[in-house]
Image (cartoon, rainbow, N blue to C red):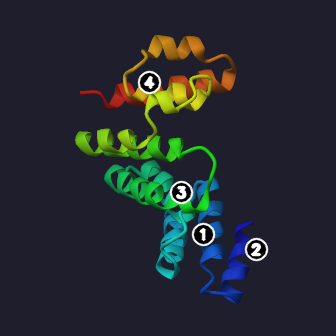
């Protein structure tokens, strides 16, 4: 996909959508600096769509730029509603929350997590809502692990619990 998107950028260098997709393709490949460059260029062309902010959040978190990841998660959350009608962007919220915590910006982390719907607005049967409750300290790590009912969820729970513990004071 990267080669095709790069060719499309050559043909239409001012197409923000192509650059957004190129950034995402680089991110999937683990080429974070390239993802950041393409996504940033997409934003320079049109700062309204949320997609490049999503990619930038995760890419910056991956390279240890926690504060930047938190700021970009906020930018994504600010923009996502006009474009998407489905569930709120929980996972990018988690990325920004962890980024701010990694940067020692605890208050910003709490504020970002507060942006996600209140627990009573989030359907308890949804796995992502259980993760939200864990990050908000409404359930324990033991409760989260107990509710992880398949390998993917167990892996995800263990990963988030491990990162959470690593960032604890």
Q: Residue at 48% x, 27% y: name it.
A: 120
Mark 2 vs 1: CB contact within 8 A? no
Please, is residue 53 above or below residue 163 in the view?
below
Q: Position of residue 54 (x, y in %)?
A: 52, 56
* Residue 52 position (above or below residue 135): below
Q: From the viewer's perspective, is residue 117 above or below residue 142?
A: below
Which residue is label 3 attached to? Answer: 81
Q: Secondary structure at mark 4?
A: helix
Residue ID at (66%, 82%): 9
| Alpha carbon distance from label 2 to label 1 | 13 Å
Earlier along the polypeptide chain: callout 2 or callout 1?
2
Mark closer to the chain start, 1 or 3: 1
Residue pointed to by mark 4: 134
Could you tell whether 147 is left or right of 120 in the image?
right
| 101 relative to 54 in the view: left or right | left
Towards the viewer: 91 or 116 = 116
Q: Compute the Cα span from label 4 to label 1.
A: 32 Å
Using the numbered discs, state the Cα–Cα distance from disc 2 to disc 4 in whole angstroms. 41 Å
């Amino acid at each position: 996909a990267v080669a095709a998107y790069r060719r499309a950028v050559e043909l239409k260098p001012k197409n923000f959508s192509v650059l957004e997709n190129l950034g995402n393709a680089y991110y999937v490949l683990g080429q974070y600096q390239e993802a950041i460059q393409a996504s940033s260029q997409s934003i320079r062309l049109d700062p309204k769509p949320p997609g490049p902010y999503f990619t930038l959040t995760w890419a910056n978190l991956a390279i240890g730029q926690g504060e930047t990841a938190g700021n970009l998660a906020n930018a994504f959350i600010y923009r996502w509603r006009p474009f998407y009608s489905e569930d709120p962007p929980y996972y990018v919220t988690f990325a920004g929350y962890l980024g701010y915590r990694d940067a020692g910006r605890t208050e910003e982390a709490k504020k970002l997590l507060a942006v996600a719907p209140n627990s009573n607005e989030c359907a308890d049967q949804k796995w992502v809502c259980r993760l939200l409750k864990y990050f908000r300290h409404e359930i324990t790590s033991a409760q989260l692990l107990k509710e992880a009912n398949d390998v993917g969820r167990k892996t995800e729970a263990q990963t988030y619990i491990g990162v959470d513990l690593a960032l604890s004071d």
